[in-house]
Image (cartoon, coloured by chain):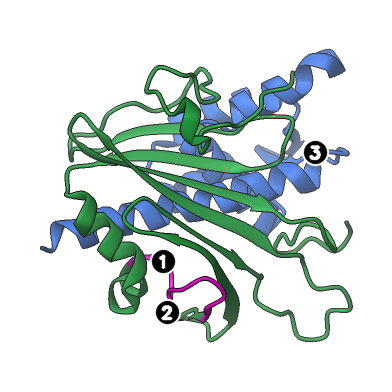
Amino acid sequence: MQLRSSILDPSTRTRNRPVARFEGADSGDPGGISYDSGVPTGELEVIRSVVFDASPEDVWDSLVRPERLSRWLGGTVEIEVRPGGRGTLTRADGRIRRLRVEVVEPPRRLAFRWWPPEEPGSLRPGGATRVTFALDSAPGGVRLTILERPMPGPGLAVPGEDES
Amino acid sequence: MIPPRDQAGAVFAALADPTRRRVVETLSRTGEATATELSGGIPVSRQAVTKHLRALADAGLVSAHREGREVRYRLTPSPMRGAVRWMATVGAEWDERLEALQKELRRR
């Protein structure tokens, strides 16, 4: 089964295009989130696509302001939001992920590359992954689509994995 | 047994559910667990966890063995295991982040 993920292709951004939908994908949420999950084959990647009842400006703001990112991304964030800008995410356990911003197209698209936290003593750190946030208007608010994909490199970093 | 050609599809279908992603992510961290232990860490009933474990077993992602009166589950070794664990772990991370982002957006 080969399913290409073209969700971020601007020329084909229609709501009806299937995005790797499988049986068991969740739908709806009393809190106002419509939630689709997709894990397409062919290319290893994780996609989440959620509609938030919020304005595009507010969602964009929560993606680019360090104080706000620090409240949801999973740690304290420092970031220079410009192509080539550097950043770090410091987790509660003290471990740090480095990141490098790649695409900034307000209020629609933000992409960065980040690395897993460095394992002390590891000979072969895991490779970088690329994260893309795409915002589109949707009934009910704003659709945020998140894509994370490994970059070619030393391989997948999975906690506890001691072989490739 | 699912034929290899369909196994990738079954794997990804199995991982489309967030509870199943949590189960796979937990098993990849802890190694082995019973349904009861798994349901302790996930906000669903033990019955629901057992149903999900069955679906994961059907997709070839987990295997069960009996130890005395307990049934213990673990991730099956497979060429896809690294990819499966990565997707489950990263998928579970994004599930948590999106919940937190929803709360953050409601603060305003």
Which amino acid type is shown beneath numbered disc 2? Val
Relative to B15, is A14 on the left or the right? left
The chain letter for the residue carrying disc 2 is: A
Q: Is residue A77 above or below residue B42?
A: below
What x and y, as percent, mark residue A113? Answer: 61, 65
Distance (Cα) linking label 2 and label 3: 36 Å
Q: Is residue A152 magenta?
A: no
The chain that hosts pointer 3 is B
View extreme (front): residue: A11
On whether disc 1 and disc 3 are found on a single subunit, the reply is no
The residue beneath circle 3 is B76
Q: Which residues are magenta?
A: A72-87
Callout 1: SS: loop
Nearer to the camera, B67 or B102: B102
Magenta run includes residue A85: yes
Residue A58 showing in the rendered view: yes
Position of residue A85 relative to residue B16, above or below, is below
Q: Is label 3 in a helix, a strand or a loop?
A: loop
State whether residue B52 is above or below residue B19: above
* Residue designated by label 2: A77
Task: Describe residue B5's horizontal placement relative to residue A22 as left or right.
Answer: right
Q: Amino acid at mark 3?
A: Thr
| x, y percent for residue A43 | 72, 37
Question: Any idea which chain is the green one in this picture?
Answer: A
Residue at figure coordinates x 31%, y 55% from the top left: A107
Q: Which chain is blue?
A: B
> Looking at numbered disc 1 in the image, what kind of residue is underneath it?
Leu
Indicate left or right for A70 with B47 as reference. Answer: left
For the N terminus of chain B, give its image quadrant.
Answer: top right
Q: Residue at x 51, y 50 (%)?
A: B92
Crowding near the residue tagged with mark 2, few <14, some 14–19, many ≥20 C-alpha atoms within 10 Å: many
